[in-house]
Image (cartoon, rainbow, N blue to C red):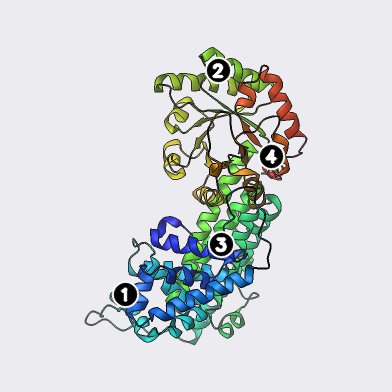
Amino acid sequence: MNEHSFTEGALRALHSAARHASAANRRFADPMDLLRSLLADDESQATVLLTRWGLAEDARLSWLERTAEEVDAGSAGDTPPRHDSHHSHSAGHSPALKMAIADAELFTRSIDRTKLVGTEELLYGLLNSHKEAARQVQAMGTDMEALRNYFRSQTADESEPLPLPEGCEPIVLADAVESADIARIIDAASNRVREGLRVVEDYARFALDDPSLTRGLKDVRHRLAEAMSGFPAETITPQRDTAGDVGTHIMAVDEGLRTSPRDVLVANFKRVTEALRSLEEFAKLYDVWVSGRFEVLRYDLYTLEKRMLLAVSAVRRLADTRLCLLVGNMPTLGDLTWVVGEAIEGGVDFIQLREKNLPDRILLEHAREIRILTARAGVLFAVNDRVDIARLAGADAVHLGQDDLTVRDARRLVGPRMIVGVSTHEPAQLKQAIVDGGQYFGVGPVFPSRTKTFTHEQIAGTGYVRHVAEQTTLPWFAIGGIDADTIDEAIEAGATRVAVSSAILKADRPREAAKSLRKKLDQVGSASRWSEASRES
């Protein structure tokens, strides 16, 4: 789901549904959670529309009160999940809710491809894909037939067929032979999608060991099965003719050429998206809405492909990094280069320049000096915030805060090779940073810091570290207040990489301080399964 395609009201409803599920100690929000969120906002377009078509106000309030009591009763005996911070884990979306959202997106595009999905469209998706939601809304007094007619009218101008020009013969519907041929095409394309998805999922699961990507691919497989159920089963599989398929005896010259796991990944993503396009086009001969579901799946696969390939690319350079030093605010350039050199000698393998108050010309001079030192040592170098300085200095990476440029805009400036990192402070930010294409992440602040001041509410804590460790194996660095006294606690929470500042910069002997921190990180073992995957790739 691309949040940029939704209105603020629709996003509020979806986030509220996730909070509602979390309050009930459920991992996934379902369609009824979304219905409750829509009805709870009496000013949402969804509620206004339902009221227009007969929704009784007293029935709405009574239903909201009853469902709230059911949640309280269901969670009263449960032990809330333990968190070490103020950031709660957000519930995901169940397959049924994802289907409703996909239907809402499809309906919106059928009206206007530039239109954002609002609460009215989310309501359509719910009622179109979830019978219980429709039943509950009808029980509250809504005239469902009038509501359906209203939704139909939204796409009427788009849906009406154009009149045939004079002298043009009407289209002849497919005969039995053509129908059998189309069924064979759909059967073969769906098999290619399933097989390709399994190959990609195996890589995400076993090579990358990434829970988030694996769940995303499993979800696509589930939604593929849902979309295929739109075809009459008795018309598709019986037409399969593997022995008579001429394509099974033809192999392209490069079909057997795979030099790395990445090649396998790319080839199977292409196979899947191309087959989905074939399904999308031929499904139009059966049902335009089924065709639309394949279209949504195809776009989702493009996003997953981008995420996986960016991750594989970044990990080749980040797999073995453990200790990042954030450096800046030094009295002189000589002090800066000296401490960077000492840190590198002590085991720091990632230097990030973080300067807030230097004039641009001096900042660029400092960045270029650090670039020379890190290049000689084979150590990665990033510039914080400043995409322009990172590019001019030839840095390996640029690191973005939540208020800096988006990953997309930064990528347009730095090109495809530079690594883009993102600071995150809570689960929702991490999820969005992954979707946006961030290649590594700052996770924190874990503890109060000597270099930056945080309120109690801003401290993410070790609870957030545990969450990230469970959710992704993309490279990430625990940050904030980490030093010789706190690093063990961060490691215990799941950190295998850390970013530090004062722990080295303010040490009497920076090289020895770096060695001590590096020793503790090396004792953790391999930073992740990514190290093996990067070497294989």
Q: Which residue lies furthest to the left in this view?
A: 166
- The nearer-to-camera label among 2 and 4 is 4
Q: Which mark is residue 272?
A: 3
Q: Which mark is residue 223?
A: none
Q: State the SS at label 2.
A: helix
**Disc 1 marks which residue?**
154
Instruction: Find the distance from the CA under tag 2 to the CA under tag 4.
Output: 27 Å
Q: Quadrant of the C terminus?
A: top right
Amino acid identity at mark 1: Gln
Q: Are circles 4 and 1 on residues that touch, CB within 8 Å?
A: no
- The nearer-to-camera label among 4 and 3 is 4
Q: Residue at x 47, y 65 (%)?
A: 296
- The nearer-to-camera label among 2 and 3 is 2
Amino acid identity at mark 2: Leu
Residue 256 appears in the rendering: no
Instruction: Find the distance from the CA under tag 4 to the CA under tag 1.
Output: 54 Å
Sequence-earlier tag: 2 or 1: 1
Above or below, comparing residue 85 to residue 342 in the picture: below
**Disc 4 marks which residue?**
490
Tell me: 203 left or right of 296: right
Q: Residue at x 46, y 78 (%)?
A: 62
